[in-house]
Amino acid sequence: MSESLVKRLEKKIAALDVSPEQSSVGHVISVADGIVIASGLFDCQAMELVEFATGVRGVALNLEEDSVGIVILGDYKEITEGTEVKRTGKVLSIPVSEAIVGRVVNPLAEAIDGKSSLTGGEEMLLEQTAAGVIERKSVSVPMMTGIRAIDALVPIGRGQRQLILGDRQTGKTTLAVDAIVNQKGKNMKCVYVAIGQKQSKVMQTVALLEKSGAMEYTTVVLASASDAPAYLYLAPYAGVAIAEYFMKKGEDVLVVYDDLTKHAAAYRELSLLLRRPPGREAYPGDVFYLHSRLLERACRLDDTFGGGSITALPIIETQANDVSTYIPTNVISITDGQIFLESNLFNKGIRPAINIGLSVSRVGGAAQSKPVKKNAGKLKLALAQYRELESFSQFGSDLDDATKRLLDRGRRAIEILKQPQNAPVRAAAQVISLYALNNGHLDVLEPDQIATWQRNVLTYIGSDEALASKIESDWNDEIEAAVKDIVTKFITV
């Protein structure tokens, strides 16, 4: 009996792996406010994941000559001076697979929606070099948002970066969510990144997406207001890493960053805690690089490289409608255009409250379908003339007929562009409305009758899918005649 026990022990000893294992281990010098300064990790990489003896993980952000500044991802209360910390040799990445679609995750791609945990998937680096010029293709395929004012006046193409900015409570998130809802059936994945918002508000948005069937193709990345600044800092990079996974498979992806003002504030907080020198408005000197390396990853790939695309809709919050402050001007210079929502217009009941004068798309008509482009051309001019004449008309009642016509056309243009929230409009209905306005068919209606007329058109076009698809695909004499029939059908003087 004892002999067999000895033999078993000899076998176990022979099979025991006693080869030396090398690992870089350091110790905590100081810990405060979620930031650890550690010594001993001399060969640590930037953005490398490190692990403390307590099991909590962190990310190396500051690489000094004799210490490393680490941002803790989790609870740091058990970490004390002298706690052991070791390198993992792994630059921060998240696992992404098809299973992430329809889920709510944190910036480390861990499920936080109460459903089953996410396992496996391809490791996607949070910090990734953007595609080069050779890999890219010009933006020419429309990405319809379902919002008349945007699709007609500041069109967005697949692969474009279009900034949405405005004061608090002016409808920025609503525009972005409507754009996500409108992608149903358009073969486009969506990623909504919520940064620094109340968790209850984000859950309302998720419920809205579920109700409209949009969660079937959407992933929500949530770093709520109660999370550590590190999560708020990493959230948009996690969102674009998820988008890149699908782009590399040749798919089109829409990413909404809501919002990058809070992202910059979280980065400022981390930088000041890491004792980085403050610059303008206490932001660190690389705050421009923070957003440029994020937004440059949005592009349309050439067919040789898969042909996928990432369309980015970053959101920025302004103060008192001032677009000339530090962070807004930074992001304006990175993006391909901006949509400015003005609080004065919002308070007047013009919603979406888009200021057409300050909103621009640097891709323009290249990202519009032929029917929309053909019928949207005169709209911006009509609105500009109306804005110009509106102020003068307040001071005098004696206006000539030409001026009155321009004012009337402008009022109807504004009514055409008004739209309730969470009600994106398909392209065919937009084309019909624009055609009716440009050709004077709506001049016989009072401005307050236009909303009812548009609802009737929307109902009618929704019941004839073949006709709607025809209007959306091309524009010729035959289609124009069909549109004219629809326009006059619902006009009752």
Image (cartoon, rainbow, N blue to C red):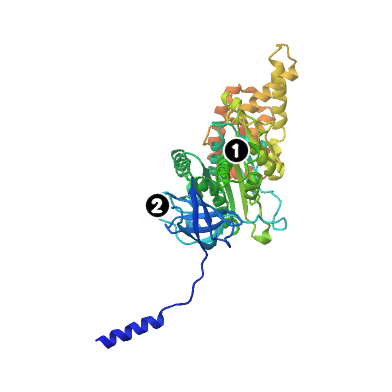
The amino acid type found where label 1 is placed reads: Ile
Residue furthest left as drawn: 1
For the N terminus, the image quarter is bottom left
- Above-or-below relation of 12 to 422: below
Say whether residue 189 is visible.
no
Horizontal and vertical percent position of residue 213? 47, 45
Say whether residue 202 is visible.
yes
Is residue 54 found left or right of 358 in the rendered image? left
Horizontal and vertical percent position of residue 198? 46, 38
* SS for callout 2: loop
Is residue 24 found left or right of 158 in the rendered image? left
- Above-or-below relation of 410 to 164: above
Comparing 107 with 96, the one in front is 107
| Occupied quadrant, residue 91 | bottom right
The amino acid type found where label 2 is placed reads: Lys
- Above-or-below relation of 283 to 98: above
> Is there a contact, CB below 8 Å, between mark 2 and mark 1?
no
Q: Which residue is label 2 attached to?
A: 115
Horizontal and vertical percent position of residue 299? 66, 51
Residue at figure coordinates x 64%, y 38% from the top left: 327
Q: Which residue is label 1 attached to?
A: 316
